[in-house]
Image (tube, rainbow, N blue to C red):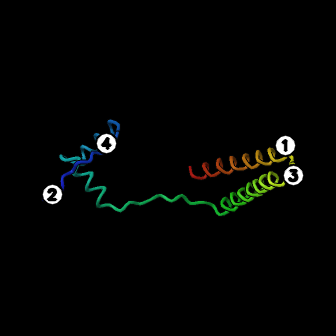
């Protein structure tokens, strides 16, 4: 006995996509989609990443960790730190990350 299909998946498509589906299926759209999805291997797109980008992001992460360590240590030991200097350094890190993200997006286009 066949297992009853009870779950429904809704997908939105535009008019052109719908027409293309209809052309390819001839009759049973549900059967066509099930066959297409269940019998095909899924190919995942893994974006390539420049090793220098990974290196730069790792350096930025190390800087953030150093700042966090200083802030945590200063709380425990009641040592006062230069808030302005930490804020400026965090802003520099933020700016570097924005540049890296912009460059990566340009490279992907």
Q: Residue drawn at (73%, 49%), measured in percent from left and top?
A: 96
Which of disc 4 and disc 3 is earlier in sequence? 4
State the SS at label 1: helix
Q: Please identify the quadrant where the N terminus is shown.
A: bottom left
Q: Residue drawn at (23%, 46%), measured in percent from left and top?
A: 29
**3 or 4: mark nearer the eye:** 3
What's the distance in space between the residues labelled 3 and 1, CA to CA? 15 Å
Question: Disc number at residue 79?
Answer: 3
**4 or 2: mark nearer the eye:** 2
Which of disc 2 and disc 4 is earlier in sequence? 2
What's the distance in space between the residues labelled 1 and 2, CA to CA? 69 Å
Instruction: Say if mark 3 contacts mark 1, CB within 8 Å.
Output: no
State the SS at label 3: loop
Question: Disc number at residue 61?
Answer: none
Residue 77: x percent and y percent? Answer: 84, 55
Which of disc 1 and disc 3 is earlier in sequence? 3
**3 or 2: mark nearer the eye:** 3
Residue 49: x percent and y percent? Answer: 60, 60
Disc 1 designates what residue? 84
Which of disc 2 and disc 3 is earlier in sequence? 2
Instruction: Say if mark 4 contacts mark 1, CB within 8 Å.
Output: no
Q: Quadrant of residue 69?
A: bottom right
Alpha-carbon neighbours of circle 3 within 10 Å: few (<14), some, or many (≥20)? few
Question: Disc number at residue 10?
Answer: 4
């Amino acid at each position: 006995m066949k297992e009853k299909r009870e779950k429904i998946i809704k997908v939105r498509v535009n008019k052109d996509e719908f027409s293309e589906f209809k052309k390819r299926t001839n009759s049973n759209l549900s059967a066509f989609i099930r066959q297409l999805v269940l019998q095909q291997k899924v190919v995942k797109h893994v974006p390539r990443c420049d090793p220098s980008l990974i290196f730069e992001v790792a350096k930025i992460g190390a800087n953030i960790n150093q700042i966090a360590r200083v802030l945590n240590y200063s709380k425990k030991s009641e040592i006062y730190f230069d808030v302005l200097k930490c804020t400026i350094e965090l802003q520099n890190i933020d700016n570097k990350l924005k540049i890296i993200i912009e460059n990566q997006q340009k490279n992907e286009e």
